[in-house]
Image: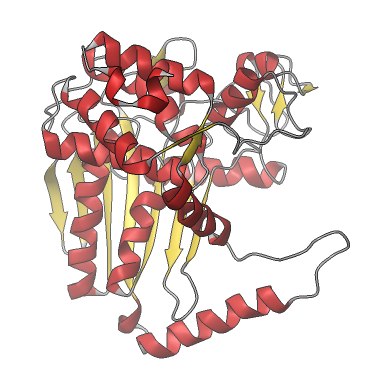
Amino acid sequence: MSETLESGRRVPVEELLSLVADLFVCCGMNSDDAALLADSLVYADLSGIHSHGVLRVPEYIKKLTTGGVNPTGRPAVIRDVGACTVVDGGNSMGQVGMDFATKLVIERAAVHGIAAAGIRGSNHSGAMAYYAQQAVAHGMIGIATTNALPTMAPWGGAERILGINPLGIAIPAGEERPIIFDAAFSGSSHGKIRIYQQKGWTLPEGWALDREGRPTTDPAAAIDGLLMPIGGFKGTALALIMGVLSSMLSGAAYGTELGDMENGPRPGQDGHFVAAIRVEAFEDLDLFKTRVDRAIRQIHDCRPAAGVERIYAPGELEFLRQEEYRARGIPLNDVTLTDLSRAAKGVRIPVGAYGWLAG
């Protein structure tokens, strides 16, 4: 396959941010919330995680206009015990509640050393690294996880019972880039499988099962079927645990309570969990960062396996993509660009102002 996921028309980052934010303002969001929502999606595209990028704009517009999500919903603290908080998202888009909760736990961790929040009354919240990495600038470790629509079976099953329930973790370093991990507990995501379907590609083996639980490389059969967990039964166990953290601590919907792939999620039922750990509550921050640098350099210096040119630390490839895409533009495929153009025309935003969109 000569083409890659990174092929497509290059789109200037600031222009993409502006267009997507304007689209969400047209859905009734205030300018700050619209900018936050746009930034979270463009951040994912900048990182090469297109499954959580502007590909989701039509889905989000539907949620905000006819899907029952409140474009002006406001998050609020509804339970507060020391460094532990429960936030109700007010049926806002998940990014609004998650950003509110993330900033809150960072403030609390500065006082208590560790702080955490469960979020309920929310909706889809995008990439977890977007929140976890906010802690790094404060000398903290960030942790974020969320529930998701059931797309996996428990190990050995053939029914959609478990969400892929991703986990994001960010760890500060010194001279090296921070360690950033963000992944679901499936071999892939529905968003990435949709990209493969858009491009007419065959899926890699190990990503998906068909409706009967048989391995498949057909994107259509995968979308109709099941996502395959990473690491066998370990992946489904971790997905279960993240689901409990995201849902049951705050009273949000768990698993099949959230909805299903055929009918979509029930609005305002998503749950998330976010935490911050202040490193200096445990160890001298400079010493900690120096040791993290050393661990990263050990990875870099490791003898590579045959056919491997370079070994990367978690999150490093995403940082490199961000640098390249900010300079050269984000590559977006024709389906995503067509969807953005259709959305802009639907709310009378002149597409002619965006040459990359109108072409």
Residue drawn at the location 60% of the way across and 19% of the way down: 198
Q: Is residue 96 above or below residue 274?
A: above
Number of callouts in the render?
0
Q: Is residue 159 visible?
A: no
Residue 192: horizontal and vertical position, in percent? 58, 31
Residue drawn at the location 11% of the way across and 32% of the way down: 30
Residue 349 or residue 296, whichever sits in front: 349
Residue drawn at the location 29% of the way across and 17% of the way down: 344
Residue drawn at the location 44% of the way across and 26% of the way down: 55
* Picture colour scheme: secondary structure
Quarter residue 76 falls in: top left
Residue 178: horizontal and vertical position, in percent? 46, 69
Name the quarter where the N terminus is drawn.
Answer: top right
Residue 235: horizontal and vertical position, in percent? 63, 44
Q: Is residue 44 above or below residue 197?
A: below
Residue 161 or residue 210, whichever sits in front: 210
